[in-house]
Amino acid sequence: MLRLILCLLMLLPSGCAMSATEDDRASSLIFEPQQLDMGEVTEGEKAVSFLRIRNTGSTMAQIVDVQASCGCTAVVPESRLLMPGQFTRVRVEIDTFAKMDQVKKWVELTDGEGRKSRAWLLLRVRADPHSDRTLRSLFDGKCRACHYDPAQGKHSGVAIYQAVCAMCHGERGQGAYAPKLAGHHDASVLRALIAQGTGSRHMPGFSRAAGGPLDEKQLRLLVDWILALDD
């Protein structure tokens, strides 16, 4: 009680003052809506929709940066400087190659004060039976930024897994967009699936020999880490 009184009387920048202003760290630039259902598309099509960003503050605000959770999502605001109460439209485009079923992604802005605001994108992707004919790979184009590049320089099983596996198979191999990995006990089968793939565009071979990002040492470290996961 004494500490709280001192904070109020002396207005010192102590922990209690920080707690009082914690909510002020949120950006006054807000996505509308904060969760957008983009509907259903066939795999390989571009999913396009629009968000708005509104300045809910009392002063002019600037959009310094806009990022998405992966390289397949492009986010382009029409304006970056907003007066109080003003809004701007934001075009969102998702490349649905090698995606399936329920897809969830986020977009995030950073304002001139370094504060952030985030919105979530929901999408349902129908399978395209003809897309197996494509020569395109997860390791090409913008997909490379998520499925190839993050593995570079990783030298532990957990780091490799988090870099290129977790987004599809879950943080601890519990399964997500892709099947569960925890509980595998056959090292040779698991290694073959990772190195050579399943023959599907959704799970190509991740070994260097198959065009993927992982060298022999990385493959061994990754397999050993997955085998140690609890079922």
Image (tube, rainbow, N blue to C red):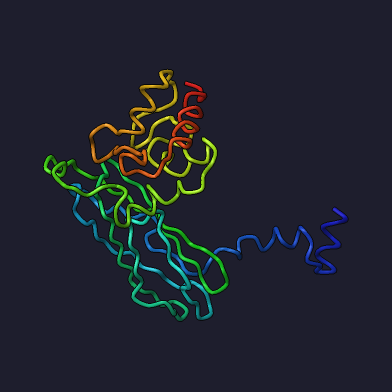
- Furthest-left residue in this view: 130
Place of residue 199 in the rendered image (x, y in percent of width and height, measured from the top left): 23, 34
47 sits to left or right of 85: left
Residue at left 51%, top 35%? Answer: 157
135 sits to left or right of 161: left
Vertical relation: 228 (above or below) 104: above
- Furthest-top residue in this view: 185
- Furthest-right residue in this view: 2
Vertical relation: 61 (above or below) 139: below
Q: Nearer the viewer, residue 53 or 44?
A: 44
Quarter location, residue 25: bottom right
Q: Nearer the viewer, residue 191 or 42?
A: 191
Residue at left 41%, top 41%? Answer: 214
Quarter location, residue 107: bottom left
Place of residue 130 in the rendered image (x, y in percent of width and height, measured from the top left): 11, 43
Vertical relation: 103 (above or below) 32: above
Quarter location, residue 182: top left
Place of residue 113 in the rendered image (x, y in percent of width and height, measured from the top left): 57, 72
Instruction: Count up the numbered dots.
Output: 0
Residue at left 41%, top 18%? Answer: 186
Q: Nearer the viewer, residue 23 or 92?
A: 92
Place of residue 183 in the rendered image (x, y in percent of width and height, measured from the top left): 44, 21
